[in-house]
Amino acid sequence: MHVHSTNIYKTALEPTQRVDLAIIGGGCAGLSLARELADRQTTRSIIILEPRTHYQDDRSWCFWSTPEHALSRLVSHRWTTWHFGLQGQAIETKSSSLHPYQYIRSSDFYLDCWKKINQCPSIASRLGTTVINLIKQEDGWNIETTQGSFFAKQVIDTRPPSSTHFEQSALYQCFLGAEIQLGHGINTEHFTLELMTDMRLLDGEFCFTYLLPLGQDRLLIELTLFASRPYPAEALREAFDQLLAERGLTDSQSLRIEYGNLPMGLPIHRSDPPRAGLGGGALRPSSGYGFMRIQRWAEQCAEHYCKQGTVVPQTLSKFWLQKMDQLFLSVIQSQPSLAPTLFNKLLGKTQTERFIRFMNDRASLIDYLHIVMCLPKKPFIQALLSNLFQRK
Ligand SMILES: Cc1cc2nc3c(=O)[nH]c(=O)nc-3n(C[C@H](O)[C@H](O)[C@H](O)COP(=O)(O)OP(=O)(O)OC[C@H]3O[C@@H](n4cnc5c(N)ncnc54)[C@H](O)[C@@H]3O)c2cc1C
């Protein structure tokens, strides 16, 4: 399914071979930055280089935020209540009307970005173009692509991490899911938002169900693992089919598949040209959420570029938050059997707005200390000691 029937990507300005800024990759991060630059009516010449020739509704983004925010026009679903629980135990509930959980469909996001970008005559794009090599010059970058070479004074690289970089991740969020059209006789009243239910171990890895009711007759359901290695989709298929059977969804129609292996805890080194998006460390190591971090970076980067003429790399968490996340990840990595209890306690025992600040990268040191107090201490002390000894 194509997202757009019209040629939405055709920009007013035909791309030239020499530009002020090249945005490598027209995915979430690349388009977010271009949209922010278009909003600021930049007059600098910019090109987006992207291998896709068309966009599909290939993912959806969820996050917690206030009901009104810069992208609220794109939010198609909001939930003020969510559920979680360990396998075989009672499901618990949490609510927030201040910060509902929100859903943006990628097709709506891509279309919105391209509409804005196309209103800005100085931003051009080359789809069907894969960047092969970047060569530093005295005054910029020579960019070799499958469609010839470009020269850009500045480059921001939003390509996914290389395979060697990806392999260095501490953990992977592996998921297989589907957006489903419900069969006759079932509607979404039978379902509620399940953030992390059926938390358990599968294949020795932490596993849970993620379910979003979407309107009257649709839902998104995913089997998710926080695993020590990436999983091919086929390896998750049997457990996913079993999940569908348990929920009485076997006969429902699958409209699209959501599958991915997201690196949680990718080591990030500052690079030249600067990186953003997943390869720049946009994913929050302890949760795998990244959409809002990308949006915040895009805003800052566009502001900086318009004022100073230079781009900035993906914004990361504060130093101590990175360290706490690393600690959290090493506990899950070394003792996956503890993960269901840890996440259940994190969701259940932490005061809701504090939990949301934690998920949104906005936790204060006090929030973090409160969170740690809710969790079993021994595994954290063990992980801390083991990290200290490894460093020596
Ligand atoms: C299915 C799925 C669901 C997700 N759901 C959520 C969610 O609910 N909430 C959340 O916070 N995060 C979520 N994420 C994580 C994260 O927000 C997304 O992965 C997001 O798309 C990352 O943005 P990005 O720009 O780094 O990568 P992408 O959006 O993948 O963009 C990278 C771009 O680089 C292009 N590219 C690749 N190679 C080259 C090359 N050689 N030259 C030029 N361009 C190239 C690609 O074609 C692509 O367009 C999800 C991820 C996936 C995969």
Image: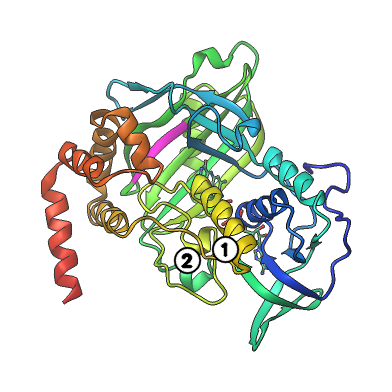
Q: Is residue 285 left or right of residue 107?
A: left
Question: Does residue 233 show up?
Answer: no
Comparing 358 with 183, the one in front is 358
Q: Residue 342 appears at what percent x and percent y? A: 24, 40
Q: Residue at coordinates 73% horizontally, 58% vertically from top-left?
A: 42
Q: Residue 230 appears at what percent x and percent y? A: 45, 57
Looking at the image, the residue that sits furthest to the front is 307
Q: Which residues are magenta?
A: 206-210
Label 2 beta carbon less than 8 Å to ligand 1: no
Q: Residue 100 appears at what percent x and percent y? A: 47, 27
Image quarter in which the C terminus is found: bottom left
Which residue is label 2 attached to?
166
Comparing 330 with 153, the one in front is 153
209 up-or-down from 323: above or below? above
Residue 208 painted magenta: yes
222 up-or-down from 18: above or below? above
Q: Main secondary structure of the magenta part?
A: strand
Which residue is label 1 attached to?
160
Label 1 sits on a secondary structure element that is: loop
- The amino acid on which the numbered mark 2 sits, given as a three-letter code, is Phe
- The amino acid on which the numbered mark 1 sits, given as a three-letter code, is Pro
Q: Residue at coordinates 38% horizontally, 59% vertically from top-left?
A: 265
Q: Is residue 206 left or right of residue 310?
A: left
Q: Quadrant of residue 140?
A: bottom right
Q: Is residue 327 left or right of residue 359?
A: left
